[in-house]
Image (tube, rainbow, N blue to C red):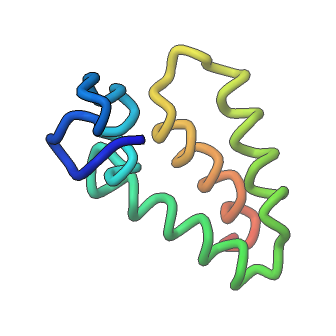
Amino acid sequence: MTSGEGEPRRDGGPRPAWAELADEPFAEPWQARAFAVAVLACERLALPWDAFRDQLKAAIAEDPERPYYESWTVALERLVGPAGA
């Protein structure tokens, strides 16, 4: 079990690396905005979340070296592209 941020575990061991990331799921503010826009797009277009998720999986498969949240923006553009046309 871990204690508060920056503190060692109660048993004296170091905190695991993931513990530092637990409170900050996004590295940059634009990543949080991309997430929020994807959620709102699905809601407003009455699409299931799986519609976005399928686009995201396809974007990642096309370019596995692309940073994760850049694949989010590609997937989002594909999801809303036809609706905006």
Q: Percent x, y for residue 18?
A: 40, 32
Name the image quarter holding residue 64: top right
Give left or right: position of 74 versus 6: right
Q: Percent x, y for residue 60?
A: 66, 28
Residue at x-position 84% and y-position 57%:
50
Name the image quarter holding residue 67: top left
- Name the foreground residue: 7 vs 65: 7
Q: Where, quadrant-wise, is the C terminus in this rendering? A: bottom right
Residue 67 vertical position relative to residue 75 in the rendered view, above or below: above
Residue 23 vertical position relative to residue 46 in the rendered view, above or below: above
Give left or right: position of 30 versus 37: left
In the image as oriented, which residue stretches furthest toward the top?
A: 65
Q: Percent x, y for residue 6?
A: 15, 41
Residue at x-position 60% and y-position 77%:
40
| Total residue callouts | 0
Residue at x-position 36% and y-position 38%:
19
Q: Where, quadrant-wise, is the N terminus in this rendering? A: top left
Give left or right: position of 72 versus 85: left
Residue at x-position 52% and y-position 48%:
73
In the image as oriented, which residue stretches furthest toward the front?
A: 11
Name the image quarter holding residue 30: bottom left
Q: Percent x, y for residue 22?
A: 39, 47
Residue 64 vertical position relative to residue 82 in the rendered view, above or below: above
Residue 76 vertical position relative to residue 33 in the rendered view, above or below: above
